[in-house]
Amino acid sequence: MRDVAVIGVGMNKWGELWNDSHRTIWTDAALKAIEDAGVDRVDSMYVGCMSGGLFVGQEHLGAMLADQLGMGPIPGTRVESACASGGLAFRLAYMEVASGMSDIVLASGVEKMTDVDGAAATYALSTAADQEYECFHGITFPGLYAMMARVHMSRYGTTQKQLAEVAAKNHANGSLNPNAQFPMKVTAEQVMNSPAVADPLRLLDCSPITDGAAAAILVPLDKVKEFTKNTPVRIAASAHATDTMALHDRGDIAAIESTARAAEKAYAQAGIGPKDLSFCEVHDCFTISEIMAIEALGLVEKGQGGAAAESGLTALSGKMPVNPSGGLKSKGHPVGATGVAQVYEIVNQLRGNSDKRQIKDAHWALAQNMGGTGASSLVHIFERLS
Ligand code: COA
């Protein structure tokens, strides 16, 4: 296996992008990554997209987007793993470069979710849960995470205020991110007083419905100097794990076991532990998800995730910043693009390009991206070189 580096990243401002189409949003991000990397060709590309069919009526994205980029006949592969589609696309690009099969690979993700109404978006998202045993009985994603939150609250004493502090922190970070969909600052009180979606989750505990794309260029580490003078960012680990699809089959619904398993493999591959990390980007599709993610990653003890945001530990200026980008909560969550946008934030932070939200002396960083209620998880670890 070869060492692999990310040498280019691109994304656009996310939100409700009425004037752009699915393909133009994706192409904009892909071209930005190619320009940032300074490459004049791509050997192969992967596109993470959860549901082009249900959101915009378009499947067969590998070929369509390779053509759109003017790069046909390169191999173009569409990757689906629900909200972890982007993270999995990134992992497959990593594997293709690491294996020696290709030298310049584009990893990308896209979703255009706002062209359908709220009910259709909720239905499309629900296809990532177990249709027969969960969705047919009327459950939605906010409902599933609400049940997980309830168990966490009753077992560990996690409070509504602690959930709200996660949202307040991520909106504070997102207010410094020009690409964020909802860059407004909110207080914990505003979060707690926002309309109930699925008790205990309020509107401001939820990630939004978003249009957006992100892209990255991966090359072998020993060829980086052929392409760019940018600070190289090494992919120190890539790990993937799955768990049961339906919540009722889990041993513990107050934990994300697939993330814990992927993290264990990733720390072993990178040769570091959670204490070595400078910051993390995690999958806060709901405030409770960030709490459970940081516990699964070993950043805090089990049951201590709620206290982490409240105490300031995970703030931008805290000992372990989590979601400096604003996370899914404030930056937005175009499901197929989220995992690649985490890489966008990490690469810019490790290069020292993150302006007002820059984390000082960042060296090691971790991205955690998950699908469904944690039926799949991707964990990547990155190292700044030089
Ligand atoms: N965070 C902050 N503000 C939000 C928001 C969010 N998540 N979602 C919507 N808003 C704002 C809108 O901009 C709008 O503001 P305005 O009245 O000033 O224009 C207002 O809240 C109402 O927006 P609307 O689109 O009508 O909300 P909705 O009730 O249709 O949808 C949710 C809100 C939370 C139900 C929806 O965003 C959702 O389903 N989120 C979860 C997505 C999900 O499950 N993803 C997969 C995770 S695994």
Image (cartoon, rainbow, N blue to C red):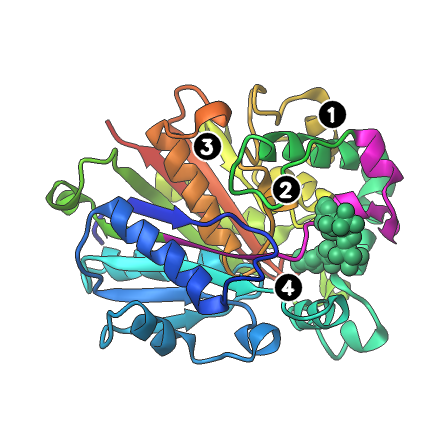
Image location (x, y in percent) of residue 163: 77, 37
Judge left or right: residue 322 versus residue 202: left
Judging by the rendered image, the residue that carries numbered circle 2 is: 330
The three-letter code of the residue at mark 2 reads Ser
Cα gap from disc 2 to disc 3, whole angstroms = 28 Å
Q: Does dot 1 land on a helix, a strand or a loop?
A: helix
Amino acid type of disc 3?
A: Gly
Q: Quadrant of the N terminus?
A: bottom left
Q: Which residue is under mark 4?
A: 114
| Residue on which the image places disc 3 | 273
Residue behind label 2 places its C-beta within 8 angstroms of ligand 1:
yes
Q: Which image quadrant for residue 268?
A: top left
**Residue 264 x, y percent position in the rendering:** 49, 44
**Label for residue 341?**
none
Is the residue under label 1 in contact with that under label 4 (CB below 8 Å)? no
Farthest front residue?
19
Residue type indicated by callout 4: Thr
